[in-house]
Every structure is written in structure tokens, then in C-alpha cells.
Image: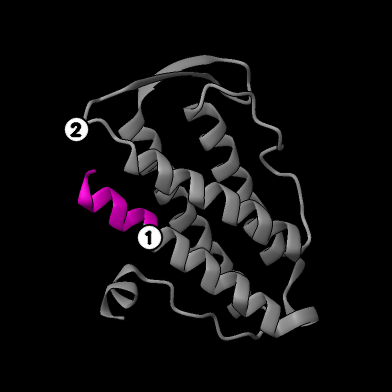
């Protein structure tokens, strides 16, 4: 199993769980825009896991969820991502064929799909932090370095 990739999966899981816990703590003070972005993060994880497994995604990319649903989708997709990495075949560059949301076909390496999934989450967590500040809330720090210091 590639250690840096596994570390990124653990970080992604930690950062999303931290945000979900903060949303739960803040309750109704969480701006809808933040829950919308969190829904997008978990939707994308579910979609990419489906593609990696050769399955049709069951969620829309911008489908909105309540907090408990976000938590469920995050847990299941994070576990699937960790399992995918754990079953890695000596770094073999497995190619994945999939169709995107515009019905265009692509082929990318499993490594690229995993890296994209983790980077995608980081990008949108930064947007959530910006939305929280814009709405008078102090965002939590989900930087990678904070994760590794713990």
C-alpha cells in the first residue's frame, strides 16, 4: 500500500469528520452554503468510489443532504477509499474507465482518481472556511499540518 496515499486518505477523513462535528456543534448557525458544500464533498467521494468500482453513481454531484446524511455518506465513502488503497496491488497503475456527469468517457489511473478525490475535498473545505468567516463564524483549521501534528 502506498503510504503517502494512505496518509492523504486518513487526512481527508479526519478533516471531513472535524467539519461535520463542528457543524453538529454549531447547529442552526451553520450557513446553508456550508452544508451545500459539504454535501458536494461527500457526493463527489461517493461518485468517485462508484467509478473506481465500475458502478453507476447513485448521487448527483450537487445533491443537497442534511447533516446526518452527510455523515453517513462520508463514513461509507471514506471506508471504501481506505479499502481501495489497502487493496492496492504493489503500486500497479490500474486504469479506470468511467463516464462523467456530462456523459463523456474517460480513462485515468486509480492513483489520479484518488489524488483528485482528496484534493477536491481540500478545495471545498477552504470554501467552507471562507463561507463561515463571511457569516461571522470562526472556521476550524483543517490544514494537513494540523492533522500530522496530532
- Name the quarter where the N terminus is drawn: top left
Label 1: state its secondary structure. helix
Q: Residues within 10 Å of mark 1 (few under 14, many from 20)?
A: some
Identify the residue under disc 1.
10
Task: From this view, report whether residue 33 is shown above or below residue 52.
Answer: below
List x then y, in percent, for residue 103: 62, 16
Taking depth in this image into account, of 70 and 105 the one nearest to the observer is 70
- 90 lies left or right of 54: left
> Residue beneath label 2, please?
90
* Secondary structure under the numbered disc 2 in the rendered image: loop
With 144 as the anchor, is 61 left or right in this view? Answer: right
In this rendering, the answer to whether 24 lies above or below 13 is below
User: Do the residues under discs 2 and 1 have CB atoms within 8 angstroms?
Assistant: no
Q: CA distance from mark 2 to mark 1?
A: 19 Å
Q: Earlier in the sequence, mark 2 or mark 1?
A: 1
Is the magenta region chiefly helix, strand or loop? helix
Numbered range of the magenta stretch: 1-9
Residue at horizontal 70 percent and vertical 84 percent from the top: 26
Q: Residue at x 33, y 43 (%)?
A: 86
Q: Position of residue 148 (x, y in %)?
A: 27, 73
Q: Is residue 112 magenta?
A: no
Q: How did the renderer colour the structure?
A: one colour
Is residue 129 visible in the rendered image? The answer is no
The count of marks equals: 2
Amino acid at each position: 500500500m502506498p503510504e503517502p496515499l494512505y496518509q492523504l486518505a486518513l487526512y481527508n477523513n479526519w478533516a471531513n469528520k472535524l467539519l461535520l462535528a463542528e457543524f453538529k456543534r454549531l447547529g442552526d448557525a451553520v450557513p446553508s452554503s456550508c452544508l451545500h458544500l459539504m454535501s458536494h464533498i461527500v457526493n463527489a467521494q461517493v461518485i468517485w468510489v462508484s467509478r473506481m468500482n465500475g458502478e453507476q453513481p447513485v448521487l448527483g454531484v450537487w445533491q443537497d443532504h442534511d447533516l446526518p446524511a452527510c455523515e453517513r455518506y462520508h463514513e461509507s465513502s471514506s471506508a471504501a477509499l481506505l479499502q481501495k488503497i489497502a487493496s492496492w496491488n504493489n503500486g500497479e497503475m490500474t486504469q479506470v474507465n468511467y463516464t462523467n456527469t456530462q456523459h463523456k468517457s474517460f480513462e485515468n489511473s486509480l492513483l489520479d482518481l484518488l489524488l483528485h478525490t482528496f484534493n477536491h475535498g481540500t478545495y471545498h473545505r477552504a470554501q467552507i472556511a471562507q463561507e463561515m468567516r463571511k457569516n461571522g463564524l470562526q472556521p476550524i483549521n483543517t490544514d494537513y499540518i494540523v492533522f500530522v501534528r496530532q
